[in-house]
Image (spheres, rainbow, N blue to C red):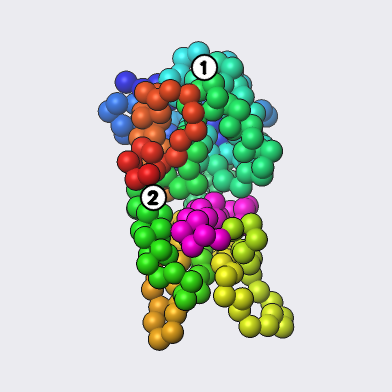
Amino acid sequence: MTRIVITGATGRMGRTLLQAVDGDGQAELAGAVDRPGGEAVGRDAGELAGTGPLGVAVGDDLAGVLPGGDAVIDFTLPEATAVYAEQCAGAGVPLVVGTTGFDEAQQGRLNAAAERVPVLVAPNMSIGVNLTFKVLDMVARALGDDYDVEVIEAHHRNKVDAPSGTALRMGEVVADALGRDLAEDAIYGRQGRTGVRDQKTIGFETIRAGDIVGEHTVLFAGAGERVEIGHKASSRMTFASGAVRAAKWVTGQPPGRYDMQDLLGLR
Ligand SMILES: NC(=O)C1=CN([C@@H]2O[C@H](COP(=O)(O)OP(=O)(O)OC[C@H]3O[C@@H](n4cnc5c(N)ncnc54)[C@H](OP(=O)(O)O)[C@@H]3O)[C@@H](O)[C@H]2O)C=CC1
Ligand SMILES: O=C(O)C1=N[C@H](C(=O)O)C[C@H](O)C1
């Protein structure tokens, strides 16, 4: 039985994770943490998740519940994740991170934690998207530089980072396969008199609307044909069950930084 602590427990993913852990025969909830002062603090986590009482009250102090946990799953905001990673490293507890939108300094803090405990960080926990990363590498290598690459993503109106972490990873996979540097070649939206398309650019287009769970398409457009590789998530449970699987897997790993490609044997 893997004892799991969930941070951001009141969020969209937090509540779905509570349901996923409750429905998993090999995992149990060891803690549910929200931001200090959050309205849910003190309430039973199951009440929030709609599972019925789980016997675990939502707390606001991760360090306090870490001794009872085998792994932490975090879907919050980058600044919170960086602090939680340091607390996990200090307590020797493995961490799974689904949060997206890290800057370089925050990535450095995750890497420092990964020197002390196993840390799995993935912008998308779904199996389908992780397979898509592999397919994109193959397609980009086969098509080469003659095809223009555009990454199009759509998410719900409440998402706070853009482009999505998944879209950026898709861009990185394609850039690596084509021997390009995403930091130099990415274009984030276009407006006005842009001039003709620079062949080596990788474009990103972002849609934010309604309750879209998460959709990604990578378009390779050449002379006379287009190839589109896409993924559509219709339920957050696909991310949550991937994260619970990751939490069970990461407890058996030595310290280091991992992602879902490691877990799925796709590297
Ligand atoms: N890797 C993957 O497969 C997926 C990744 N994500 C990513 O997960 C993250 C969360 O998404 P989502 O659940 O939709 O977002 P929500 O805004 O619904 O949830 C975020 C949670 O984090 C809490 N939080 C925010 N700031 C802090 C803080 N400083 N300290 C402690 N807790 C904090 C929020 O509390 P409060 O509400 O009180 O602010 C809330 O409970 C995003 O980065 C998103 O991109 C999402 C889906 C899949
Ligand atoms: O915020 C979301 O909702 C999602 N975020 C992730 C991302 O930024 O890639 C993954 C998923 O598409 C949902």
**Residue on which the image places disc 2:** 130
Residue at disc 1, CB closer than 8 Å to ligand 1: no
Decide if residue 228 is on the left or right side of residue 98.
left
Asked if the residue under mark 1 is in contact with the one under mark 2, i.e. CB atoms within 8 Å, the reply is no
Kind of residue indicated by mark 2: Asn
Query: If the image is split into quadrants, where does the N terminus sit?
Result: top left
Kind of residue indicated by mark 1: Gly
Range of residues picked out in magenta: 156-180
Please state the horizontal and vertical placement of residue 261, each as a whole percent of the image. 39, 43
**56 in relation to 238, above or below:** above
Please state the horizontal and vertical placement of residue 50, each as a whole percent of the image. 41, 37
**Residue on which the image places disc 1:** 92
Outermost residue toward the bottom in this view: 224
Please state the horizontal and vertical placement of residue 200, each as a whole percent of the image. 57, 70
Q: Could you tell me how far apart the alpha carbons at marks 2 and 1 are, in whole angstroms?
A: 28 Å
Residue at image location 58% in from the left, 53% down from the top: 159
Q: Secondary structure at mark 1?
A: loop
| Foreground of the two, 158 or 85 | 85
Outermost residue toward the front in this view: 179
Query: If the image is split into quadrants, where does the C terminus sit?
Result: top left
| Foreground of the two, 228 or 161 | 228
Residue at image location 62% in from the left, 64% down from the top: 185
